Amino acid sequence: MKIIKVINNNTVCVLDENGREQIVSGKGVGFGKKCGEAADTDRIEKVYIITDSVLRKKLIECMAEIPYEYIKVTDDLVNYISERVNVPLNGSLIVTLSDHIAFAIERKKQGMEFTNPLIDSIHDYFPDELTLGRYCLGEIKEKLGVELNGDEAGFIAMHIINARMGTNMGQVPNITKMINDCMEIADTFYSGKIDKSSIAYDRFLVHMKFLAKRLFSSQELPNVLSRDEDILTLVKLKFKKHYKCAKCIQDYVMKNYAKMLTEDELLTLAIHLRKISE
């Protein structure tokens, strides 16, 4: 591997034997090295092959500014998280999570700790991600000797949610709040009689997560159900109460986020609402 850029003592950019640009890290791998020299492969602990030039640039900047120990711990955490989720994670997680951890540790040293206003909603609607966030806090304490505020598990969970759903971090708070508010609308509409331990409720929650993702990513699904007059009539007449609740959710989304649910989404919501309410 030929070195093309020395980022710091522990990270260099190289070209492999096929001419692909890679980022490699390891204790002392860049110490005393210059461009054009061969990388000491015995020192390499991690190889990052990133084809996206923007993401590669961000990772290089991140590694140049953040202590190597933080990067190494974050990389271990990303590997742990990847093994426990059922969808591919966005490759930017190593960048966003290492940056967050470094900033959180710095704030901790300065006596500044933030509370997470969405922690209850994350607990209710993204429990798996919150569990992973708490695992991360335990690893940070054990490996870096820093005990972060428990609310940081919620912030880490938000990074994981973002990486799983393919959204950007700015959308995660809105997605979480929208899901929480829509679930409360349904709970109020049915006078608190929804069985939140049922499989139907779990399916409804999954549906709301993907609905929120589509809305904030401006992804539109083609109308299929609503083209069938029999289905349309059946839902609107026999599921009249549940369709009304779906319309309440649509009104909320439109008023607060200026996003419109399609007729198919209203019909699907009504079907889910009937299942969770009965």
Image: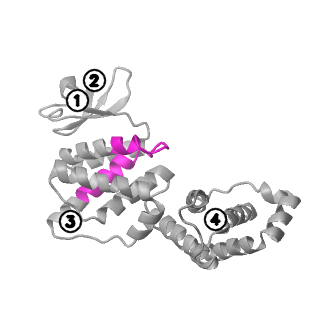
| Residue 57 visible, this angle | no
**Would residue 100 be counted in the magenta stretch?**
yes
Residue receiving disc 1? 44
The disc placed on residue 1 is 2
Instruction: Tell me the number on the disc at residue 107.
Output: 3
Q: Nearer the viewer, mark 2 or mark 3?
A: 3
- Spatial CA span between label 1 and label 3: 31 Å
- Where's residue 186, x and y in %? 61, 73
Numbered range of the magenta stretch: 78-103
User: If you read the primary sequence from the N terminus, does the residue marked by circle 4 or circle 2 appear first?
Assistant: 2
Instruction: State which mark lies toward you, 4 or 2.
Output: 4
Image coordinates of residue 29 in percent, x first then y, are 18, 32
Q: Which quadrant of the figure has residue 161?
A: bottom left
Estimate the x, y position of residue 122 in percent, counting from the top left. 43, 64
Mark 4 vs mark 1, CA separation in Å: 53 Å
Q: How many C-alpha atoms fall within 10 Å of the one at disc 4: few (<14), some, or many (≥20)?
A: many
Horizontal side of 187 relative to 237 (left or right) equals left
- Which disc, if any, is residue 251? none
Name the dominant secondary structure of the magenta segment. Answer: helix
Q: Which mark is residue 276?
A: 4
